[in-house]
Image: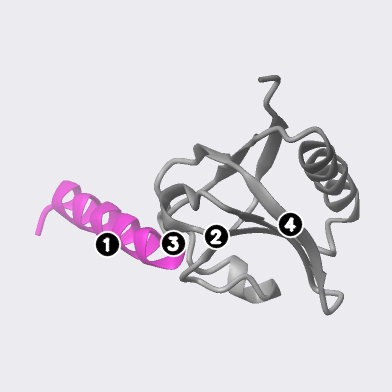
């Protein structure tokens, strides 16, 4: 086997190995949420629940280890409830592995990556 063929084979095997190491997720997505409540669960997460279930997900959660983000989400979510506003939530619909590490189940919950209060 020539050295160029060996090199091509090595590159192929390396790329194949890398593709198996880390999960490949779809792009992040924004959805509109009509917040029903905000809750802290057993010191492991804060979640918001959405009445309208964007993409079928009721819950969007943040691990309590992200203290600054938890406080920001709590502030925006509380304002949305008080002023009867919706929020936009940023999440990855195909991420089924991150949430369960802090109590956000893989079926009805997604880790919250961003949140924005809608002005309307």
Q: Nearer the viewer, mark 4 or mark 1?
A: 4
Is residue 27 found left or right of 100 in the rendered image? left
Q: In this orientation, does residue 94 appear? A: no
- Residue 16 magenta-highlighted: yes
Which residue is at the far bottom? 42
Circle 2: element type: loop
Stretch in magenta: 1-22
Q: Decide which of 25, 5 is in the foreground and name it.
A: 25
| 42 up-or-down from 119: above or below | below
Query: Which numbered tag is attached to residue 61?
Result: none
Name the mark nearer the viewer: 2 or 1: 2
Report the magenta stretch's main SS.
helix
Residue matched to label 2: 58
**SS at mark 4?**
strand
Residue placed under numbered mark 3 in the picture: 23
Mark 3 touches mark 1? (CB < 8 Å): no
Q: Is 74 in front, or is 36?
A: 36
């Amino acid at each position: 086997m020539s050295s160029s063929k060996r090199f091509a084979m090595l590159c192929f095997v390396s790329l194949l190995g890398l593709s198996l190491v880390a999960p490949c997720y779809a792009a992040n997505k924004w959805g509109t949420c009509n917040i029903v409540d905000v809750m802290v669960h057993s010191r492991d997460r804060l979640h918001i629940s959405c009445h309208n279930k964007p993409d079928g997900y009721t819950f969007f959660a943040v691990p309590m280890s992200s203290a600054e983000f938890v406080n920001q989400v709590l502030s925006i979510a509380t304002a949305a409830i008080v002023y009867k506003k919706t929020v936009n939530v940023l999440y990855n619909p195909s991420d089924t592995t991150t949430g369960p590490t802090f109590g956000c189940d893989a079926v009805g919950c997604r880790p919250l990556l961003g949140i924005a209060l809608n002005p309307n």
